[in-house]
Amino acid sequence: MAVDNDTVEKIALLAKLKVNPEKLNDTKLEFNKILNWVEELSEVNTDNVLPLASVNDETLTLRQDVVSDGHIRDNILKNAPAQEFGYFVVPKVVE
Amino acid sequence: MSEYVIETEKGKWEIVCGLEIHCQIISKSKIFSGAPAEFGDDANENVSFVDAAMPGMLPTLNEECVHQAIKTGLGLNAVINKYSVFSRKNYFYADSPQGYQITQFEHPIVGEGKITVDLSDGSSKDIRIERLHIEQDAAKSIHDLNPTKSYIDFNRCGVGLMEIVTKPDFRSPEEVGAFLRKLRSILRYLGTCDGNMDEGSMRCDASISVRPLGSTELRQRAEVKNVNSVKFAMQAIDSEAHRQVEIYESGGNILQQTCRFDPTTGGTKFLRFKEFSDDYRYFPEPDLPPLILSDELINKIKDELVELPDAKKSRFVNQLGLTPYDAAVICENKEVADFFETAAHGRDAKKVANWLMGDFFAMLKKKNLEIAQSPVSAENLGKLVDLITHDVISGKIAKDVFEIMAETSENPEKIVEEKGLKQVTDTSAIEAIIDSVIASNPDNVASYRAGKVNLLGWFVGQVIKRSQGKANPALVNKLLKEKL
């Protein structure tokens, strides 16, 4: 599996990363190195093997429906670049 | 089947529509954190570090949200999947501090099911459910506080949602409306979602395409987002379908796109094309192992399930003798159905249904009250019907008594007793009134005897009037005929 420059640009866009055009080719080569390395796994026959979500054989622990958190607004807003009336304030984002 | 065809000079078209409905789960705390899942509190009060996606915070699944999803699945006649998996749906937007939504993708908790909807022409249709999965809700953005800024409130962020996806089975706006009302009724019976579309606790997205009538092809669809009432959903589908037909007929093509319904124009507004935006790069959620359900748990929830609207409706028809229409109206709302059952207990259920759907509903509407606030209790409505059935009062007097009940919340027996409204069934008392009516109207008596027999009705009226409405009409009739 190999990716081209367009794919790298698309991934960068989805990840909200700016990739310098001069670096695009290098990034592509690095991507492909990693992909080729992972590709080695395809040598193993996995036809009848279910995908593994985790290497731990743990089961999901459920929580009882009890209110045990919240009402810590000052802490929640502490690192906000901007806030007003108890809201986070961000650049206008209207779809 | 209800026929819905868009007919133009150039041809006939039908719509193909499927729905995705997001339903907020009723629970005390959020789906992955212990913050309150409360609606209407001050901004960012109901937020934990998990909801705010602070580094190192881990989600823990709320067991009640799982139970509510199983319950809903059973109510949709659906398969419950004993193995389900949480996934990350990646997107970048200010309403999700995580940068992704925890949802279920390839392995949802509930599989295929169906809902039967009743249509206005008396037919019914099965709408197939594709799946139901559980996920977290996003934050609420407020855009009108500032011209250049958006304000974000994370109280809703992390509240449990059930996303219900249907197959593309809808062929008319009416079917969509009937489905949404039925789904809402089932959710409210189950107590898993309050179904208030105007408050956003139940939100509907519709996928719509059109095709020439009789064809089986599936054309490119447009998605209409977040319609917040049943009426708007029906309007949005109708106007979007007409828009697509117009484009096809003028030689154009539909591109996959997202629109928003605009209630002020009744039309759909273009939002964006779907290109990059739907590249969600799902992968299994590393912080949550797969969810495994036991037969024991599923069966326990099944055993505790309340009687659902369809079952209740057929019981009201088969055991209490209601018409299917009356039963459907009464069963749509669980509080109404419960009120009716209490009122009808041990009585003629049809008579109680007539009172409930007639004077009683009219009274609630006039006073703008919910049934839970009714001044007339179910027991008292039942007693009023008893008074008519046992000939204690006439149907006409009963209406007056009902009005007093609506004002005073009083027991009808007491009202009848205190106001002396009991029907007169004493023959001699009625005879005395008849004699006085005959004595004071010699002309009409002569006409009647000369053959104008339809004057009998007039005499009956006079006698009942003089008795202040209390004389038993059947008895008056019988005695009048004898006397005349």
Image: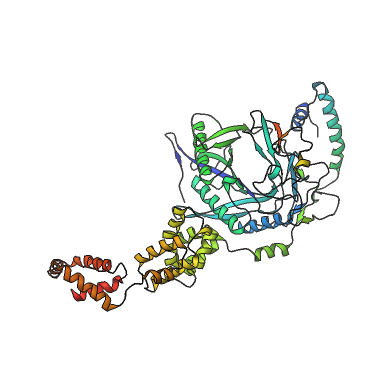
The image's colour scheme reads rainbow
Looking at the picture, tell me which residue is in the foreground, B335 or A29. Answer: B335
Q: Where is residue B151 in the image (x, y as percent from the top left)?
A: 68, 35
Residue depicted at 81% across the width and 56% down the height: A59
Look at the image and tell me whether residue B323 can be seen.
no
Residue depicted at 25% across the width and 69% down the height: B463
Q: Which residue lies furthest to the front in this view?
A: B418
Q: Where is residue B208 in the image (x, y as percent from the top left)?
A: 56, 40
Looking at the picture, tell me which residue is in the foreground, B405 or B75. Answer: B405
Looking at the picture, tell me which residue is in the foreground, B154 or B67. Answer: B154
User: Total marks drawn?
Assistant: 0
Which picture quadrant has residue B303? bottom right
Residue depicted at 66% across the width and 28% down the height: B148
- Which quarter of the rendering shows the C terminus of chain B? bottom left
Query: B436 left or right of B252?
Result: left
Residue depicted at 71% across the width and 42% down the height: B44
Query: A18 left or right of B302?
Result: right
Query: B63 left or right of B365?
Result: right
Relative to A55, is B387 above or below?
A: below
Query: B83 left or right of B201?
Result: right
Q: Position of residue B393 (x, y in %)?
A: 36, 70
Looking at the picture, tell me which residue is in the foreground, B310 or B423. Answer: B423
Which picture quadrant has residue B216? top right
Relative to B240, is B64 above or below?
A: below
Q: Where is residue B472 in the image (x, y as percent from the top left)?
A: 31, 72
Look at the image and tell me whether residue B367 can be seen.
yes
